[in-house]
Structures are given as structure tokens and as C-alpha cells.
Image (cartoon, coloured by chain):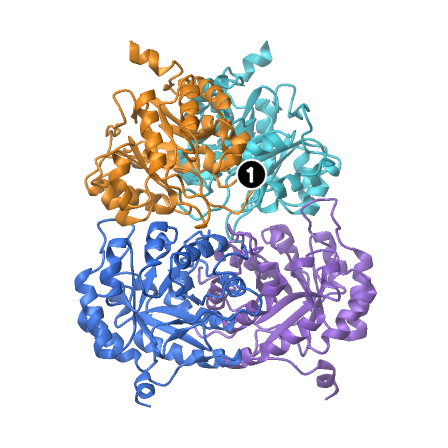
Chain colours: A cyan, B purple, C blue, D orange
Amino acid sequence: MSHSQLIAKKHDQDMTLVSLSSEVIFGGEEVVIIGGPCSVESQEQMDTVAEKLSAAPVQALRGGVYKPRTLPYSFQGLGQAGLEILARVRREHQIPVVTEVMAIAQIEELAAVADLLQVGSRNMQNFDLLKALGQAGKPILLKRGLAATIEEFLGAAEYIVSHGNPQVVLCERGIRSFDNFTRNVLDLGAVVALKQLTHLPVIVDPSHAVGKRELVAPLAKAAIACGADGLIIECHPEPEQSISDARQALSLEDMVALVHSLQPVAAAIGRSVRTTPERQLLAA
Amino acid sequence: MSHSQLIAKKHDQDMTLVSLSSEVIFGGEEVVIIGGPCSVESQEQMDTVAEKLSAAPVQALRGGVYKPRTLPYSFQGLGQAGLEILARVRREHQIPVVTEVMAIAQIEELAAVADLLQVGSRNMQNFDLLKALGQAGKPILLKRGLAATIEEFLGAAEYIVSHGNPQVVLCERGIRSFDNFTRNVLDLGAVVALKQLTHLPVIVDPSHAVGKRELVAPLAKAAIACGADGLIIECHPEPEQSISDARQALSLEDMVALVHSLQPVAAAIGRSVRTTPERQLLAA
Amino acid sequence: MSHSQLIAKKHDQDMTLVSLSSEVIFGGEEVVIIGGPCSVESQEQMDTVAEKLSAAPVQALRGGVYKPRTLPYSFQGLGQAGLEILARVRREHQIPVVTEVMAIAQIEELAAVADLLQVGSRNMQNFDLLKALGQAGKPILLKRGLAATIEEFLGAAEYIVSHGNPQVVLCERGIRSFDNFTRNVLDLGAVVALKQLTHLPVIVDPSHAVGKRELVAPLAKAAIACGADGLIIECHPEPEQSISDARQALSLEDMVALVHSLQPVAAAIGRSVRTTPERQLLAA
Amino acid sequence: MSHSQLIAKKHDQDMTLVSLSSEVIFGGEEVVIIGGPCSVESQEQMDTVAEKLSAAPVQALRGGVYKPRTLPYSFQGLGQAGLEILARVRREHQIPVVTEVMAIAQIEELAAVADLLQVGSRNMQNFDLLKALGQAGKPILLKRGLAATIEEFLGAAEYIVSHGNPQVVLCERGIRSFDNFTRNVLDLGAVVALKQLTHLPVIVDPSHAVGKRELVAPLAKAAIACGADGLIIECHPEPEQSISDARQALSLEDMVALVHSLQPVAAAIGRSVRTTPERQLLAA
């Protein structure tokens, strides 16, 4: 990477901090945990998720309202109705929300609700979308493409930053490989490399990486141990009933237990995972 | 693939014919050859290309005016100025032109000039772009993503067709693999599979697949031998001076020689490659 | 590749000719076709294969007697009993035979029967086996490893040649990739590259590459069109009853038809495929 | 995996313990650390390594005497002279040693010295070697092939176990992928899967996985966090002078520091890494 690039880490440079709120900041000492379902399915679903995960706690909720699917006939997300659900859960539970943006035309409505706009793997090199997100005025979660090199991943982030938005979080979510026992291969070597090459925060999505819920927790620990600044993990009130990605979603109970098991791992490398409910923190 | 899909080939079904003009038709007996530079660089460049390739001949000219590049600081194409060049070369040389569309906002202006709108590998699953191209009123050249499965490739085509545009040509252009001796790995097994799975025409881009000009000609022959309905090949008046993809462009002389060498291969499997200049055909 | 390597092609160097008999020579104008089952199963099976394929004809018969299998509990080949069958079919039908060698301890007995000793993909970098085959006194068919780079493939051949055996035929048989619609991805770009990098003959195994019989014939044509010096194709009297690799074996009738369809493709690039039964040639 | 397989983990089954000595046991609560150079280069080199690493400590020393190399002209290891060095360092420093076996003919001499015989990636499916190692009377370290599926990896281990040797340690060492920024991609998802599928211990080689020394330490922590039973790490008195794999070797000082930093990570998941010199333990 050329030294003239905006996202390249110079000697002893401070990490970029990406803030969703005064309490939810990527790139600091605290490892940020995002949880929630693949898709927003109903108000009841999201309320249950928000309530139960307050015991973890998680620092932000995920939930797709526009869903990229291999076939046009598959569930494409609830769209605006889902966005309204997301807005209400955000307001009532006082928790930042993350959702995917698939098109320039969606930016305005999504940015009005979401605290972090996710660019999915399929759109990592949708350069016009990236340029437009440079003007979105919201932090961006950029997921690595399924077969993107580290250089291409950094190049995609550079598009957003060079177009005006320095608030970018990178997300490793597994790359495509030859063995379909796991859905993808989680590339933690890339996470370590990225932490050395750029000052942007780097988080990990172990759920999409392995695609099987029983493999998620150990990989979440591994991600923290190697220096990831956060995790985004799929969970659902009734995982087997999930409309999409049912095979990889944790139950909410397992998600809470996972978060608590992450704290000692973070502590082992001099970082922390929050395990006290945020509402108490807010009250303090 | 489900039999309810629009692009799935049913028993003994006729192939879809995709026409750029009354003489340039993908999916018929004739193998269609597209040639030209990676990027439109100047009017002089494109005039030279059009003139010299009339001796091949080629049935359409390629040339990018909007270029997807890994970094925002690389040459991004001439944009509208390039499009005007493309319009003039199309008019003066009476030859269909192919160019890449990267964003919904570009569709209208590009569709006003181009005879075939190319969706690049990086945008194969840019579903909002695909949906919009379902309404573009122009044939679409859909390139396979760098790590797209055959199922995903067909799913992407289904987005375009199900949104109103049955004129889709698929293009295999190499997939990402572990050996960087060649730029990518040309997956002719996918071409053979696609010809059996869908009634859409399938063409091959050997230039991007191997990335080295000295390897292009034998792969072009292989593509025809296994049943490809066309080829799209990069060539340039001065390959080493090409602004982008210099390493893989053929000289115009080599391109003309290649086209002539393809005819016996096509004949060997009961098809044809045009080797008589089109102007004579038009005069007939 | 360094110019000091034995197998590197120097300017205008002649190709190495690898001869199984006075009539079966790899690396010349004629494209050599090898056919036969994955495994030798019975004398009757091999006699049927030899008889029926004399109408193709094929220039050599393949048939494994030692079989590398993922699990130790799978059929491991008939071993010495299979080798006796192979010896008899070779003698009675006057046709060269090819079989796989998996261990140094098998070289002597196999070399006493086989005209071409195959090193399978799993053993491409079994360097002690390669060194021993340098002293085997028989031509070697070296298959590319599942994830071997071109450089590693050439390095493996160099082991055999530098240990005394210049009679090596390289075989591209598909590399491992992310899409399991085809068993592997046939890398014809590697074939073209190898033909430029080395003076050793290069053949193609389309059967293992795609793993589905309905995809084999078009890829066989593609292999010849791009310059392969031969083909090795699996076929079986009753493909569905094949003990191993049943899904990819052609029927003997389809194999005969395939060979005849290859001749015009070979002719299109100035080469030939034999379509007159060899017995007549021997009688001449 | 079939339940009839010897290495498949049945419900609540105890892990297999693989012992190199009464103090060095894979599969228990303690995470076992192996360190040392790629190749045994001299007695002085190995003495320095053994002395300095006693401060880590490591539980075993690695050092290749037979080296699998892409080209026959590269350094192939010191062979018997190297084995004598290994024997002396083992005796004088009272530490178990690990070295690679490439051929059946080497088993006897290597087994007379080494406490753990390593099968390298290239030989993972060298089935005759695996069968012979079933009779070797020594624990085996089986490294995953560069493109081996989890099923194939387990199948290879089954060959050893079913031929009489239940003392097998599996080692994930990175798989081949499209990005050459790291040498390979460390597949920790496979480690997690293997721990659930088999009762054999599973260790990780982060050095060969990433191929760059500055990336090794964080991945070593990640491996422990996700449940690996041990690590094998390359280090050298003068890394830049290493005859092979110079780019990935840690200095001995960095190796000692790494081991100490691993202990809190192991503790975080209820395991341990030894940080008190073994000589003191022996004296106790």
C-alpha cells in the first residue's frame, strides 16, 4: 500500500475511532459486540432480541431490511416496514442499530435510522455505492468480498474515505474456499495483517464465516485473541425458524453466554468486553 | 436450478438469440467475436482499432468509459468524453459497441450509445443494478464474479430476466485461484455446464482469464471448441502503452490473425467464425 | 523457471517425445488418446474395454490396480491380481497400458507390466517416489496436484528428470476450487503455459476435472484445441456399475464417438487424432 | 464421518492423549508448545535454540533433517548428519524432538531418535507412508494438506490409526487461497470443527500459515483461544540467516516472549501454557 493512502497506518499512528454513540466506539480498548438476526422479521422478534441481549450486553443490534439473495424469488427483506421496526427498537431500547445498504437510492432512508451502514460482501467493489457512502454522514461497516485480496479490501475502504467519510469499520467475514464443511474460511491472518496495515478498526463476523452455530463461539474467542476490535454475530429468538441463515444463528441464551465467555479472553490481551448491562451504565 | 426459473433450459428448448443488429446475433450458429481495448483512450485509438479490426473482422467493439479500479486514484475511464468517442466510432464504422455500466445512474446515457451493456465481475451481485438493467431496453453482457458459483451466476442472470429483459449473454472470464502465474483460471467446465443448464448464450473472455497475451490465442480456440457462443478479447494499437491491462492486450495484427485461426476450430464443431470483412457483407 | 533447469524450454527447442511403443508417441503431431476404467475390476471388464475401444481407437488403456482412496475402508484396488489382468489384456490386445504407482515398493512389479507409470495428484510432491521413478526405466505420467502451482508442478517433473528419467508426460486434471458443481476446475490456461515453459508433453484428464460424464466431451475438444498432446479419459462397460468414479465414466460407445469427434478439432490446429483401428495400422 | 471410524468422537468420549514423555502430553489441559528452526543446520544452532528456548519454555524442539523442497536443487536437509545433531541436542537438553519423515525408508532411523514423527502437507495422502507409520511405534504429527478437506484430513489420520498407531496429533497449517499477502490462510474454523469431530489432539502451525513473522504471535493466541491443543512455531537464532523459510521464523527472544504472552489466553479458556523452565520441573 502506498504511503499516500489515507487509510494506511503510519509509524505510531493512533487508531481511528469510529463512534456509534458516546458509549459505543470501535477502535478503542473495548471490544464492541454486535448481535441480532440476519433479517428483521417482526416487531416482536426485534423486541425480544433487544430485551434478551441487554443481559449480554451487546453494544449494537444488527438486522437486515434489504437482503441480497442469490435468487430474485427468495425473501428480499421487509424493506421500509422493516426499517420502521428497526427505528422503533432503536428508540425504545436506546441501542444503536446496524443494517445493510444495497443501493445508492436506499442511503438516505437508511441513514435516517441506522447508526452504522453495512456494505455487504457482494457490494465491496460496488464503487459508485462506496463513493456515495463517502457522503452519507454515517459510519460504514465494510465487509470483505468473498474473494477479495487484502489489497482490494483496503482499496474499497479508500474509496469511502477519499470521498469524505473517515468513519469506516472493516469486517472480515470468511473467504470462499474449497471445503464446504464450513460455509467459508475465516481468515484471521487477514485481520492481523489489516491491523498492521491500516488505522481503521477491524471486526469479525464468525457467523457467516463458518455457517454452523456450534462453531461460532470458539472462533469469536479466536478473533478477539488476535486483536479484532469487535464482533458481529447472528442470533435469533428461535434460530431454526429464522427466515434466512437459520443454520448459523445462535439462540439468544447462547449469545448472552458467549459474550460473558469473551471477557476473560479480551482481558488476556489487555482489552475488555462489556458484561454489565448498558442500562445500568446509562443510569450511572 | 428449479424448473420454474426463466433462464433454465427445458428439454429440447431453443437457445435464446441475443441480437445487437440484424447481423450480430449471439446464440446462433455463428460464434460472435468482440474485440477492442480495455479502456477508450482517444478517438484516434478507437478509429485505428475499428479500421484494423474490420479485417478480422470482429462483430463488435469493446471499450470501457467507466472503469472499476481497485484504488480511487487509478484512471477511472474517460466517462462522458469516452462515451462520445464510442458513439462516433460506432456511427462512422457501423459497428456495434460494448461498454461497462457500473451504476444505475449511468444506464440511460450508456444505453443511448452502446448496443450491449456489460456488467463487470465486481457487480455480478449488485442486485439493484441488475434489476434496473431489467428495464434498460438493451442486451446485457453479464460477467461471472471472481468467486461466483455457477448457481450464483445463473441467479444473477435471473434477476435481469425476471425484471423484464430476456436479452442476456453470460460471460465466463476466469475465476480466482491460488496460482498467480495466470491472472485467473479460465473455467471452461463452467461454460459447458452453463450451456446445458440455461438457454442463454455463453461467451468467454480469455484475456482477463489468463492476463498474459501469449496465452490468449490457444484459450480462445479452446473456448470455441467446447461450445462458447462468442469471445471478447482485449487488443490495442500499442499494447504496451495501454493505460490499463497492458499485459494482456493483443496487438491488432495478432487479433486479426487470431480471428482467422478460429474459423477452422469453429468449423470442426459445426459452427462458424466470420472471416470476410463485414463491409462486403453489408454491400451484398 | 531458471534456464538451468532440465525441463525448461529453450528458444526453438524440440519437444521431448515420450514413446510407449513405435506407434504411441506423446509430443508429436498426433494427439494420443488413453481410455479405460478408473479401476481394473475383472478380466472380462478389461477385455470388453480393450475390444470395444479398438474401434475408437485409443492408443493406450488405463486401469488402476492400486487405488488411492480417502478412507482406508474403501476399495483399494485389486493389487497383484489386477496387475495380472492388465498384463494379459496388454499381451492379448497388443496395446500399451497405464497404471498408477503409489509407492516405491510397487515400482518394480508395475514397471514389469505397464508402459506408462502414473503418479497421482496426491503424490505429485512425494519426492522420494519421484526420485525412485527417475530410475524406473519407464515413461512417467505425472498428474498435477490438486492445489499445485505451475512452478511446483514443473519442480516435481524436474525431480524425475534430474534423477535420470527424461521420459515424463505432464497431466492437467483439474484443480480444487470453490464451486462443487464440477468436481474440480480444469485449468487449460496452465496447459497453454506449460506448453510454453517446458519441452515435456502435456496431456489433459477431463474426467477427473469435471467429474460428470455429460461435461467430458466438450472439454476434451477444448483441451485439444488449446494444444494438449493427449487425453486420458475414463470409460467403463457399465458406467453406473463402476466401483469408483462411476459418475464421470463414459460408456464405451460414447468414448468411441468422442474419439471420432476429436479428429476435426485436432485437424483444425494442424494435428491429428487416430480414428482408424490400430490393428489395421499394425498390419500395414 | 461414519460412526464406525476409529478417530470419530463419540458422545462424551475422552480425548486421546498423545505423550512424548511423562511431562509432554497433547490433548490434556496443558497447551503444548513446540519451537525450533525449519531445518537443522548445525550443532551450534540447535544447542543455542535448546538453551534459549528453555526460558520459554517449549515442550519439544522441531528441526527438519529431510526437507521437502519444490526443486531438487534446493537444500534438501542435512540428512543423517542432521539426525545426529538432533539426537545429541535431545540427549543433552533432555527435550523431546520432532522431525519430518518423507519416506518409508527413513522411518526406522528417524524413529530411533525422534519423539514425534511429522508427516508434511505434501505427504498427507501418501497412503503407503501413512500405513507404514501405523507400525512405527512412535507418535505421529499429521499436517493437513494444502488443499485437503476436513474429511480428507480425517481420512488420512484414519489410515494411521487403523494400521495400528492410535497416537496421532493433527496439525492445521494453513490452506492455499487466492491472496498471497499471507503465504496461506490459517483455517481455525477447521480446528474448531476437528475438535468436535475427532478425539485426536489438534495443534496449529501459525508460521507456515502466514509466512511472515510479524503476523505469527496474534495468530498463535487465536489458535489457543479457539481450542487448539498445541502450537508448532518456527524460530531461529538468526532468522534472516535461516536456510529455509527465513521470512517466517521468529527470533528466539521473540519466541520466549510469545510463550509468556500465551499463558493468560490459555487461562482465559481454562487451560494453561507452561512458563516455568522445565529443568526446574524435572528437579522437583
Asked if residue B33 lies left or right of residue C209, the reply is: right
Picture coordinates of residue C40 (x, y %)? 23, 66
Front position in the image: C14 or B268: C14
SS for dot 1: loop
The answer to whether D233 is drawn above or below residue C257 in the figure is above
Picture coordinates of residue D183 (x, y %)? 51, 41
Front position in the image: C132 or C102: C132
Picture coordinates of residue D169 (x, y %)? 31, 34
Task: From the image, tell me which residue sits under label 1.
Answer: A64
User: Visible in this render: residue C139?
Assistant: yes
Asked if residue A236 lies left or right of residue B36, the reply is: left
Front position in the image: C156 or B282: C156
Residue visible at 52% across and 53% down?
B148
Front position in the image: D52 or C119: D52
Asked if residue C132 lies left or right of residue B277, the reply is: left
Q: Amino acid at mark 1?
A: Gly
